[in-house]
Structures are given as C-alpha cells and as structure tokens.
Amino acid sequence: MIKDIYIGEISKNEEIQEDCFLMKVKVASSFENPTPGQFIMIRIAGLNDPFLSRPISIYSFSRGKNYCLIELLYRVVGKGTQILAGLIEGSQVEIHGPLGNGFEIQTVEKNIIFIAGGIGIAPLSLLIESLCRRADCSPSAMTVYLGFQGASAVVGLDKLKKLCRNITVCTDNGTLGAKGFVTQIFQKEMKKFTSDNTSIYACGPKEMLKSLAKILNKSKFSCQVSLEERMACGTGACMGCAVAVKDKKGVFGYKRVCADGPVFNLTDIIWESRV
C-alpha cells in the first residue's frame, strides 16, 4: 500500500542531550495511527540537498482536534540529521509514512521484557505507551532494560518512569546504574523469567542484538527485534537495506528492513556473514 507524503510543521525541536534531539511535528489529521515499531521518512520541504529522506522511528503519537502530533527522538549522526537538528519552530518538513511493519502483540504475557540500546529506546517507548492503554496489561508486568554508553547519553528515562515500575539502567562506563552492556545485565537476570509466559522486545545497535541472539540461542523465549539500518527509499524499492534471514524451514534468503521489517523475529535473522 502506497503511503501519502505529508507536509508537517515543526512545533518543537530541542536538544535534550548532547547530539540527541526531540522533534514534535504537526501533520494533517488524515495521518494513520502508527503501529509501534513503524517509522517515517523525513526531509526538509523543498530542499534538494540532501536529496534522500532520513528514516526515524516514531517515539510518540497523539491526535489533536484538527491535527496529529508525531514525536521523533533522533541522534545526529551525519549530514541529514545535522540539518534536521538546525530546524526551528514553524519549519516545514515532508513526512512519508507510517512505514514498515511494527511489533505484533496477539496476547499479553505475564512478563513483558524490553531491551533497548541507545536511541533504540524510541520505538520501544511507543510500544510501552500502547500496552499501557490496554486493559489486559499491568505496568507491573513490564520490565525494561536500558543501555547507554554513559550518563550523558541517557534519553527517554523520565518518560518511561511514568509508565513502568521495573526499570534497570546500565552504562558501559558505569557512570549511571549498573556497569556493563545491557545484554549482560539481562543475562544475569534471565532466570527470573520463564519462556512459556514471557515476551521480549528489543531495539538497538546490531552488536547488541547479535549478542542477545547468542544469549537466547538455546532458549525458547519469544523475541521480536527492531533493526536499525540505513535506508534510501523506505519502501523497499532500492533493496539497500536487505538483511539475511532464514524461514521456518531454515532456507536462506533476504528481506528488506524498510518494507518487510523493521521488526523481525530474532531467530529469523542470520547474524553471521555468508560466503
């Protein structure tokens, strides 16, 4: 299904941590309600350099009387995001979306675990917000593990504290919370959960997800992950974001992160390179 391109107006674009920004954009009320895990492609309206849009996960979404408000949490990593960071209130942007396939939740398990690395907190925050609105989901059922390089890189924590009771923060350098990688902290506490009543949702850098795959390799835990990949088109036309996967029969192939993902079952992804 082809998604419309909307002209949005920025109502806020604030640096909340070094090189990390929170942008709020108003778009027409016809914008579809996003599924947690979906993303948008964004570029400055009328600007041809850079020509390509940038993919950003939807951090939060709400509806006003005559508009929708999209919140985007992003980190400056290159020319495109640097330009976005310089936009002021009232600036116009082109938004294509919502795009991709988000997280699937058919039943709410007794235990729901979220594992986020860095800016991977963004799509998981929208998922947690969505679950909190469900009558069959209790905040006490949710356990969140957040990993950052250091205290100065922590974002989104205040928001999650309003939604969840069980939050563990860890930093690589030990400047806040437990010292160590987020997957290491989760591994130490895995024995508190059982696979038959636990669902895991994760988003973060490739190495984090690769480590999580090794930890869960011989377990029966259900885990969905949102992949972070460079995208040129956001619709699957260019095949620039393809990742190696295997189907239920173990047959090797490729899927596009933008069109077939960005959310996949962790066990479907082939992390080791193939010759």
Image (tube, rainbow, N blue to C red):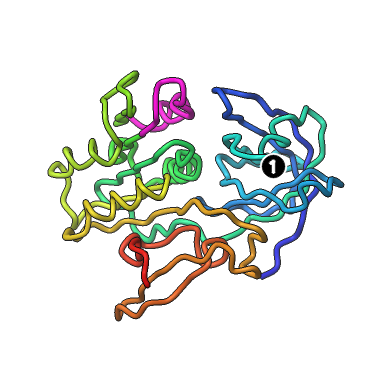
Secondary element type, mark 1: helix
The span picked out in magenta is 147-165
For the residue pair 245 and 95, the one nearer the viewer reads as 245
Give the vertical position of 253 relative to 53 (above or below).
below
At horizontal 70% and vertical 68% (from top left) the residue drawn is 2
Classify mark 1: residues with Cα within 10 Å, few (<14), some (14-19) or many (20+).
some
Q: Amino acid at mark 1?
A: Gly
Q: Residue furthest top?
A: 175
At horizontal 59% and vertical 69% (from top left) the residue drawn is 239
- Expressed as whole percent of the image width and height from the top left, the position of residue 219 reads 17, 58
Tell me the quadrant of the picture where the N terminus can be found. bottom right
- Expressed as whole percent of the image width and height from the top left, the position of residue 56 reads 60, 46
Q: Does the magenta run of residues contain 148?
A: yes
- Expressed as whole percent of the image width and height from the top left, the position of residue 156 reads 48, 29
Q: Quadrant of residue 25?
A: top right
For the residue pair 225 and 167, the one nearer the viewer reads as 225
On the rendered structure, is 217 left or right of 209? left
- Expressed as whole percent of the image width and height from the top left, the position of residue 210 reads 32, 53
At horizontal 63% and vertical 55% (from top left) the residue drawn is 98
On the rendered structure, is 144 left or right of 110? right
On the rendered structure, is 134 left or right of 25? left
At horizontal 57% and vertical 53% (from top left) the residue drawn is 230
On the image, numbered disc 1 is attached to which residue?
Answer: 80
Give the vertical position of 202 relative to 160 (above or below).
below
Q: Residue furthest front?
A: 275
Q: Residue furthest left?
A: 191
Tell me the quadrant of the picture where the C terminus can be found. bottom left
